[in-house]
Amino acid sequence: MDDKPNPEALNENSEHLFSFGVIADIQYADLEDGFNFQGTRRRYYRHSLLHLQGAIEDWNNESSTPCCVLQLGDIIDGYNAQYNASEKSLEVVMDTFKKLKVPVHHTWGNHEFYNFRREYLTHSKLNTKFLEDQIEHHPETMPSEDYYAYHFVPFPKFRFILLDAYDLSVLGMDQSSPKYEQCMKILKEHNPNTELNSPQGLSEPQFVQFNGGFSQEQLNWLNEVLTFSDTNQEKVVIAIFPFTLTPLTVCVWPGTTEMPWQSFGLTSVWCVSLLVTPMMVATLRILLVYTTST
């Protein structure tokens, strides 16, 4: 889907500042078409690569080149693990991304963890923390190595923050680790179903195995970054996986459903997230950022 600015909504004083691309749920696999977990949506595993190629072609040919692209998770499908094809499929998609002329920032979704352990992802090409911005004299804004999150500045007075929605999760964890035990305990306290991926009968349906949550440590770090942005009058874009249809509500546990920045007096905080579409690949080809003087 394309999101172009409405010329009628921009006055003569509007100034184009920068643009960035967004893509999510590529879920590539070298497999015949299939269906989602519920059997309600068709999935085009091989065809998804064509959507990515089309998006990259559009980004490269934009008259105003985007500053970067946000890849919001589920880059390959979980079925790859069943066929021992995880690394090969990831290589195919990453080779396709090499044709893009601008940096790509990756977040991790549940399908990354169906295919790989967290330790693998940390040392893979899907870790783009090397693109982070470090704020001098503010060590509190440096993220911990215990979760995958960072922030960067694509344009003066704009800060992008990538969050780790599987910081607390049973997916991709060493089952003998204390953190895995902690997460399983949280999950079973809120989900009595035998099938932990089922939300049936739950008053809090986000407590399913394919979801995850933020640790208090990560939320404290986010608090510090938002405080810095608030003090310095920065506009903030937060990239995260995943969202529900309810505005500003994240499908994460434990109990972290309302976004933590609502208490801040920030000038602007925008959320960037895409839900899977019937075609499986959710593509927001370009976002243009304008400023308007009145």
Image: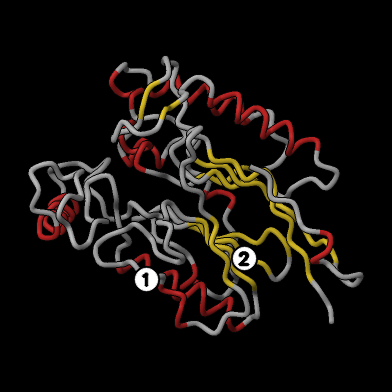
Quarter placement of the C terminus: bottom right
**N-term-proximal mark, 2 vs 1:** 2
Q: Is residue 207 left or right of residue 242?
A: left
Q: Identity of the amino acid at label 2?
A: Arg
Quarter placement of the N terminus: top right
Report which quarter residue 132 is drawn in: bottom right
Of residues 164 and 29, the one nearer the viewer is: 29
Q: How crowded is mark 1: few (under 14 residues within 10 Å), some or many (20 or more)?
A: few
Of residues 182 and 266, the one nearer the viewer is: 266
Q: Is residue 34 left or right of residue 188?
A: right
Q: Residue furthest right?
A: 12
| 2 or 1: mark nearer the eye | 1
Report which quarter residue 195 is drawn in: top left
| Residue labelled with disc 1 | 258
- Compared to residue 128, the image places residue 237 above or below, namely below
Of residues 239 and 87, the one nearer the viewer is: 239
CA–CA distance in space, label 2 to label 1 = 21 Å
Report which quarter residue 58 is drawn in: top right
Query: Which residue is rendered at x = 45% and y = 66% of the image?
Result: 248
x and y percent of residue 75 in the render? 47, 35
x and y percent of residue 25 in the render? 48, 38
Tag shown at residue 159: 2
- Compared to residue 186, the image places residue 51 above or below, namely above
